[in-house]
Structures are given as structure tokens and as C-alpha cells.
Amino acid sequence: MEGLKLSDAELMVYIHPSKSRNVRKAICRELSSLLFQYDETFDGVLLAYDLTVGSKQAKILAGLTPYFGVRVNTKLLLFNPKPNSLVEGKILKVSLESIHVVVLGFSAAVITDVDIREEFKYRMKDGEECFVSRSDKDHVLKVGTMLRLQVQSFDEEVMHIAGSLIPANTGCVKWLEKKNDEEALHMDRDRKRRKL
Amino acid sequence: MGASEAVTDPSSLYQMDYMANDFDSDTAVVHTVRNALASVQTGESDSYDELVGVMHVNRFSDSDAVAQLASVLKALSGSVACIDIIHHRKILSAIFGMKLWDQREAVMDALVGLIISLAATSGKYLDSCLNMLVSNFLPPPFVIKGHSEPRIINTKREVLSRVHAALLKISVLVPLAPSRLLPMLAHKMPKIQKKDQSVVIYVENLLKLENSSIGQVSGSMILMMVMERLRDLDLEIGWDDIPQDDPSRGMFDMELEDPAEGTMDEGDELPVGSLKEDTSGENIVSELLDKLMVTAFDHLESCQNAGRLDQVFENLFVSFENYILNTYKSKFTQFLMFHACSLDPENCGVKFASKLMDIFLSSNKPRTTRMSAVAYLASYLARGKFLPVSIVASMLKRLVDECADYCRTCNDDIRPEAHQIFYSGCQAIMYVLCFRMRSILDVPHFRSQLIPLESILMHKLNPLMVCLPSIVAELLRQAKAGGLFIISDSFIFDDLLESELSRAFGGCERLDTFFPFDPILLKMSNSAISPNFNYWAMVRATYEEDEDDDDDAEIIVNGDEDSDEENDGDIDYAMNKMSITPKHSFKNNMERDRLMKMPSRIRPSTSPESL
């Protein structure tokens, strides 16, 4: 899974005086208001944060309401899938024209039929819609499958990913990993044989 | 895959036949539609224009055209990837401009399918799709006019069930859709000036959304929207629209208990229980509010049946705290809380009382909020028939302890403006006792919890002088008969509903005369509330003797009445529940109606102006 990163950020959080009784709670509330939103400053969608308040000193802003600024050291978990990166998600719906996936439980991703490689054929299996690989019938994409897809674009406003299954390293995560393991085993055996 | 082939296929773009009967022809239509969409970019827009033209068919067009439209819409949902937001602006605006209400069922299904595909396929269309669906919450004029006709009810069900199903599907495929939906719901809500059936239908839909999985995420906001609208309508109804009673009567006087007025003539001016039955603007507002309240009651009942009332109650209380608690002169909206509590007294009922108590006791809340909270608490404990005595007694104990603590630390003389919180607490205790003293004194343990009350009343702050004289008089009368305590001072309260001192402690908001759960004066809402409502006529004061035999007699009298028991079942139930004097017999329906309107007689307690 790509598109996730950890960032260290030093932030100045401005707190309303009425919240001065519990500053930590007030900081958490401010930061929580940024969750699941794309923020240009962070260059990503904030998924989680951890914070430490460095100093007990705060800077009081002059003005009608004396907000006070608290310096906070944070560790932020950010999500920003760049084009051509690989992300993983769960398939929610399969139809002849598209596969709908949810990534990390909040971001909707869709792969339209033009972006599904020729290898996959649309089938109706036991009343269930799915895409089956022509080369390996065990490689099935159906509702519930964890899918690895390539990002084509990411709409930051609605957190929508346009994905693609054209590259060969995309498809069912389980199947891809099994295949990788088998290939690794195969290469291992070859190496051993050569040594012998 | 297929689409790229289709797009490059220069097959005939003219004389399209969109009629599809089987899978193969379905695929053919998809290809034709994709070609038409692709043709725009090459400058050949005839087939595309023809496609756009098909969109203007409605339920009144001939069946071939309707079938063609359904077929095209299905094909479009299979070609969403080929739609470009810039090049295909015309067809997109035609799709988003379509109303499900204008279409037949086959087209409705195809259109909803297309909208779901569009919303889930690209973030660019999400808002427009949600907007289009939400705009279907507002019915066209022909539905509003004939909203009770079976045919219209059927259409309404057909359309709205599809809209809700579509919204749910979109929210599954696009998990953040509910957060985009909320501002649209608020924006599309009919304006406050609009007072017709459309508001009721819109609110029904909002509540239906609250009941769905979308409500899990944004239920609290939806409830706030509904609560805010109820409050706004509530405030539009002035007290002037409610008939005035004789102000010289005390708040505990009841016409039914007054032997002199035992038999009223039919020609008498009636103390109407509901709002004036004229056609004025306010009457329209009150009818609308009544309908909305009943809709909200039904929603609460459905939540109770689904076992999620507890969760909804939390959200409801937040809305109540934000919109109602501090609203001056809120008259009806608060009954949503009352009804929710009556549905689940053990859980919600207790929670409501404790939350109000917590607000009253929290020193960092504004004064008016605390006073309002205790006014709500007192009125709720007095009026909630479903509340067990143990709960009332435990709440009273907390109030009594709080006031006793205050007395210990305070060494001041009577200064109503300086001790408003204290006086409002004392008045709350007294008010609840007026309604509940008899049942509390019956249990020695509860009686012992009230012992500090005497010292509070005897304190230099002298709440008996400051609180509303009518309440104090009733309390002293009952306390004397019940032997609660001995108070040596004698007070004269004749014909005094309030005094200078009570006015002073109530402040300009007149919180001294605020009893928010006095009988609700909306007809339909009242029938839902009254079975759980403690009317003053039903209260057994300590000075009254047991009249069980008489009550039995009264029930028999009612039973002898000729009449349509089925229609008036609720009325009979409500009347039988009252310990009213058996001297009355219901001569006819009119008389019976008049008696049902009795609650307005004790209304003066809530309305500052009427004093």
C-alpha cells in the first residue's frame, strides 16, 4: 500500500480562552476538525495524529478575544495517493462497466471498464458478478476481495480515486502475494540448483 | 476494454434504435450511445442532440418514447466513463434536471441507476447527483394538492422509496457522501415562509434518512435541522393566538372541579383547548406545527420499535439544549423530549431528568440556562405520568440538598435579583410537590428526604415570600393536610398569581412563570401526549379524601353514554384517567369536546403576557 506517509509537524494551535480549562482537549478538538479532509499545507488527507505540547508557555493574541497560541509537536499520518502509486481497497460492487472499491474505509475508488485489462473477463458466477482472469481462473475479483489498484487521479475534494487495473502488478492482493511467494520460491530453487 | 472499441467504431450515428429487448440489443444500445457521446468531440453532434432530445420525455408521453428513454438511461449508466463533464454538459444538465415525480416506474428505475453510477464513478458528479436526489424530496404542486388521494400516496411511495434507496447505495459506494449531503439537506429545506404540505413531506424524508445508515453518521445534524424548524414555527405562534382565560383564576383551578360551573351551557363561550379555529396565518402555522410534531412523534416511536431510541435520544437532547432550552417562550417543541421520555421512561425518562439537573447544578453555565433547566425539570417531574415516584423523589432530594447547602452558606436577606438560581430551585421543589406530594408522603423514606425543606423555607432568604404565591399557597395547603411540616407564618395569597418579588426573581425572561410542559394546545399532538400526561385534574392533593368509589361511578357513567366509542376511544381513555368530579355527564359530543379542551384553563402558568 502506497500513498501513506508519516510527517512530523510543528504547529501553532490557537485556542479560545473559554477552552483554557482543558488545553489538551481543546488542541485535540482543533486537530480533529481537520481529520478526513485534504489540507494543502500537509499535502494530504489527515488520518490520525499524535501530539506533544512542548512548552507550557503560550502566546496571547491581541484583540477583542484574547486567543492564545500553543506550540504543539505532532506526528501526522497523511494519505495522498499520487498518480501511478498502488493502493489497496475492498471491492464493494462489481458490474460489467466498473468495479467500485473503498480504500482505507473512507475513500471511494472506481475502475471503469476501459481501465480493466483484457485479461479479466466479466462473468456471472452463482448469481454473483465478478471478473475472472483468463490466464488463471483462481484470480477472481468479486465483492469482498481486497484489490490492489493503480491510482490514475485523486480528487482531493471528495476523496475519490480513479483507478486502473491495466498494470500486471494489480489485481487481487491475496493472489498477487501468493504468486510473488511462488516466484520467490522458484527463484530460490533455481539458485540452489545452480549452486549444486 | 469494450468502450474504446465502441468509441472508435464509426457505425451509423443516425436513425438510432434505442429499443432493447434482450441482452444483445442492450449491448448494442450501449455501443450506439457511446458512439453518440464520442461524436461530440469529433464535431458531429446530430446523434448526440438526438440523445439529448430523448431526455425530455415524461410520464405523459407515449409508451414507446418512455421505453426508449428507459433504455437510453440504462445504456448511459453503462457508459458513464465516456461522459465528459465539459463536452456533455447538455445531456448532464438534462439528466440532473429530471424529476422522478414526472416519470413512470421503468424510467424512475433507470434514472436512479444512472444517478448512482454517475455519483460513484466520478467525484465531479457526486454533488450534482445528491442535489438531484434531494430535490425530489420536494414534491410537485399536484402532489401537494392531492396529498391524501390514494393514487398520489402511491406515487409518493414509489418515488421516495427509490430516492432513499439511491442515497443509501451512494453512501455505501462513496463513504464520505453523507458529509456532502448534509449542507444540501439544509439548503433545500423549504423556507420558513412556506407553510404547506411540502414542509411536512420534506421533514418526513429527513427523519427517514435519520433512521437509515446515513443517520448513523449525520443523525444529530438532521435532528437539529428538524428541531430548529419546529422551534421557528413555534415562535411564530404568539400567545395572543391562544384564547385568554380569566386571569383571576389561579393556575391550580380547574373548571371541572368547580361545582358552580359544573354544568356549563352549550352557548357559553368555550375555553377552547386548541388554537383559534379561524383561518388566520397563525392557525396555518399551528396546524403545520401540529403535523410536524406528529411526524416527529411517529419517528420517535419507530426508533423505539427499532431499539435505537437510546442513541437517538442523545442526539435529540443535544438539539434540545442548543435550540430549545434557552428559547424564550418555546411552547410546543419541547414535547418531543416529553414524548421520547414517555416511550422509554426507565432509560430516556431518567436521563432527561438527570441531564437537566446537571445543567442546573453546573456553575459554569449561564444563569438563564440554569433557571430554564430547573423550570423544565420541575415541569417534567410534575407532568410525566410515566415517571415513578422513586425518580421524582430522588430528583427532589438533589434539589433540596442543593438549596439547603445554599442556605447554609448564604446569610443574606430577601433579595430576589441576587439569588435567582436559589429561588428558581425552591420554586421547582414546591411546584413538583404540588403535583406529587401525596405519593411522596406515602413512602416514609421519601418523606424523610424532604426534612431539610422546612429549614430552607424558614431561612432568611424566605422563598415562601418570593416564589409564585399561587404555588406557595397550594404547597402550604397540601403540606398542612399531609403534615409535612409546621410553618407558623401565615400568608395571604388571595387572588395572587404572582407578586413583585416573584417577578423580580424571574428576571426579564420571566422564568418564574415558565412551566414548559403545561398542557400542549395542539390537537393532534395532544392525543399522543395526553395518555402520559399528568393533568392537574388528575392530581390527588393531600387535602382531598379518597374518592375511589366516585371514580368508579364516573367510569360507569361514561360507559352508559351512547356513542361511537371507536372514534372517541382516546377521549374516553383520557377522561377516565382523570379524577374529575362525577357530577358531569357528557350530554353530547360537543360537551365532551369542550371538556377535552379543559387544559387551557390552567395555561396561565406558562404565559407571561396572560398574567
Image: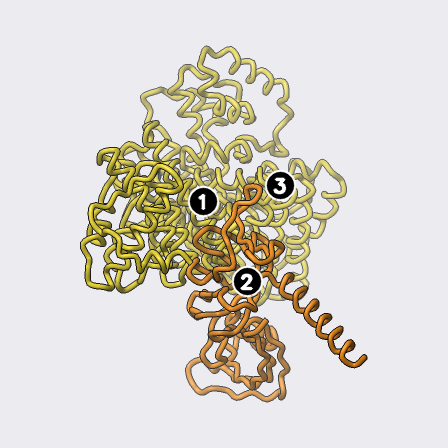
Chain colours: A orange, B yellow
Tell me where residue B204 appears, x and y as whole percent: 41, 42
Amino acid type shown at disc 1: Ala
Residue at image coords 51%, 10%: B560
Q: Is residue B150 above or below residue B335?
A: above
> Which residue of the protein is positioned furthest toward the right in this rendering?
A196
Tell me where residue B29 appears, x and y as whole percent: 32, 46
Alpha-carbon span between mark 2 and mark 1: 56 Å
In this image, B449 relative to B282: left or right?
Answer: right
Letter of the chain that mark 1 sits on in the rendering: B
Residue at image coords 46%, 42%: B296
Alpha-carbon span between mark 2 and mark 3: 33 Å
Which circle's residue, 2 or 3, is located before the other in the chain? 3
Letter of the chain that mark 3 sits on in the rendering: B
Q: Which circle, 2 or 3, is nearer the viewer?
A: 3
Marker disc for residue B165: 1
Q: In the image shown, does B538 or B417 lie closer to the viewer?
A: B538
In this image, B106 relative to B547: left or right?
Answer: left
Tell me where residue B205 appears, x and y as whole percent: 41, 44
Q: Which circle, 1 or 3, is nearer the viewer?
A: 1
Which circle's residue, 1 or 3, is located before the other in the chain? 1
The local secondary structure at tag 2 comes to loop
Q: In the image shown, does A196 or A98 lie closer to the viewer?
A: A196
Q: Which residue is mark 3?
A: B345
Q: Is residue B84 above or below residue B353?
A: below
Residue at image coords 59%, 79%: A6
Q: Residues within 10 Å of mark 1 (few under 14, many from 20)?
A: some
Residues marked 2 and 3 touching at CB (< 8 Å): no
Q: Which residue is mark 2?
A: B419
Q: Residues within 10 Å of mark 3 (few under 14, many from 20)?
A: some
